Image (cartoon, helix red, strand yellow):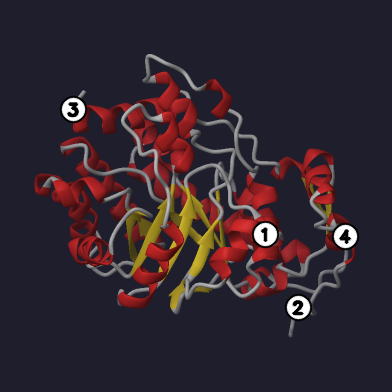
Amino acid sequence: MSRVERKIDHIHYALSTGQSRGTGLDNIQFVHRSLPDSSVKDISLSTKIGGLQWSSPIFVNAMTGGGGQTTADINAQLAEVAAVCDIPMAVGSQMSALRHPEERLTFQAARKANPSGVLLANIGSEATVDEAKAVCDMIEADGLQIHLNVIQELAMPEGDRDFRGAIDRIAAICDRVDVPVIVKETGFGISRETAQLLNELPLAAIDTAGFGGTNFAAVENERSARSMSFFNNWGIPTAVSIVETVSGAPNKPVIASGGLQHAEDVVKSLALGASAAGLSGFLLNILLTGGQEALIEYINQMKTEMRMMMCALGAKSIDQLHRAPLIIFGQTEQWLRIRGLEPERFAVRIPAPFDS
């Protein structure tokens, strides 16, 4: 199978098979405030990641590239939507474009379509410093994602089998690239222990990319003659991974991703401690089935709904949303309790005054 065919396969299987939706966010409920003393017009959605000011915590997370004209068109369309909605966008892994220069256009299409927007480059943890610099230069990136994809590689017949030295390579990249660096998972979640290791590095943020969205183990098992089905339910649910990451890396902004679809998912993720929220497969499905106008309408509606929920909670900003009391129950509560992460503390938080 060619590289282009494999990339197209990934898109097909991600949309038809890989959306698992076991995020754990259904186990989160807000404590209602009858006197929030708030106004929708005063709600701010702005956030800061690695020195970059974002007008909204929502962004288009890494998806694709390197699959010929099909993925070039997708990246261009997503970038145009991001420009209209004034949100950042990350491209998919650019590793293949370093080895096959003809694939660079599939990533550069995003910058061409959105010349002044916030655009994040993407590379694997196996990359060298020079490779990291090259992918940033390729799309004139404002930031760099380094993705961790151990399970996908193990499930992929042609994937890597040696993951030694990744933390040292990430540290070297952080020291020598000129843009903020974000480390992200690829659908299996960041644990507290992993977050503690990453907390020692000069990262701009950590992206949880928890279990509940595109399941790349299931994707690879669909396209493989031999199945590693034991990986299909492997991973840390998104809601749990947010709390684990915030606990392990209290000095780093946390980005929530992994199965987020609606404004309620985003607000719950932010209330658990995240500072931004990446959406990918769900947005791609809207684009491919309804077109750019439908996707623009959906993202703008999400922003409106977020402001409504934040108003109801008396939270003027994302920082104030971090103090909104909420109840955690079900499997999410059980996981956090077993891991010593005290889910009950979320229920007794004191909300910030709206006018503070």
Mark 2: give few (<14), some (14-19) or many (20+) Cα within 10 Å. Answer: some
Instruction: Read off the residue under disc 4.
Output: 347
Q: Are marks 1 and 2 in contact (CB under 8 Å)?
A: no
Q: Are marks 2 and 3 in contact (CB under 8 Å)?
A: no
Location of residue 188 in the rendering, given as x and y in whole percent from the top left corner: 55, 42
Q: Earlier in the sequence, mark 2 or mark 3?
A: 3
Q: Earlier in the sequence, mark 4 or mark 3?
A: 3
In the picture, which quadrant includes the N terminus?
A: top left
Task: Indicate the amino acid at tag 2.
Answer: Phe
Q: Earlier in the sequence, mark 4 or mark 2?
A: 4
Task: Indicate the amino acid at tag 4.
Answer: Ala
Q: Compare residues 302 and 237 and report the one nearer the observer.
A: 237
Between disc 4 and disc 3, the foreground one is 3
Q: Are marks 4 and 1 in contact (CB under 8 Å)?
A: no
Task: Indicate the amino acid at tag 3.
Answer: Ser
- Which label number is shown at residue 354? 2
Mark 3: give few (<14), some (14-19) or many (20+) Cα within 10 Å. Answer: few
Helix, strand or loop at label 2? It is loop
Q: Earlier in the sequence, mark 4 or mark 1?
A: 1
Helix, strand or loop at label 4? It is helix
| Mark-to-mark CA distance, 1 and 3 | 47 Å
In the picture, which quadrant includes the C terminus?
A: bottom right
Task: Indicate the amino acid at tag 1.
Answer: Met
Location of residue 303 in the rendering, given as x and y in whole percent from the top left corner: 55, 58
Q: Earlier in the sequence, mark 1 or mark 2?
A: 1
- Say left or right for 275 vs 133: right
| Mark-to-mark CA distance, 1 and 2 | 14 Å
Instruction: Read off the residue under disc 1.
Output: 308
Q: Compare residues 96 and 32 and report the one nearer the observer.
A: 96
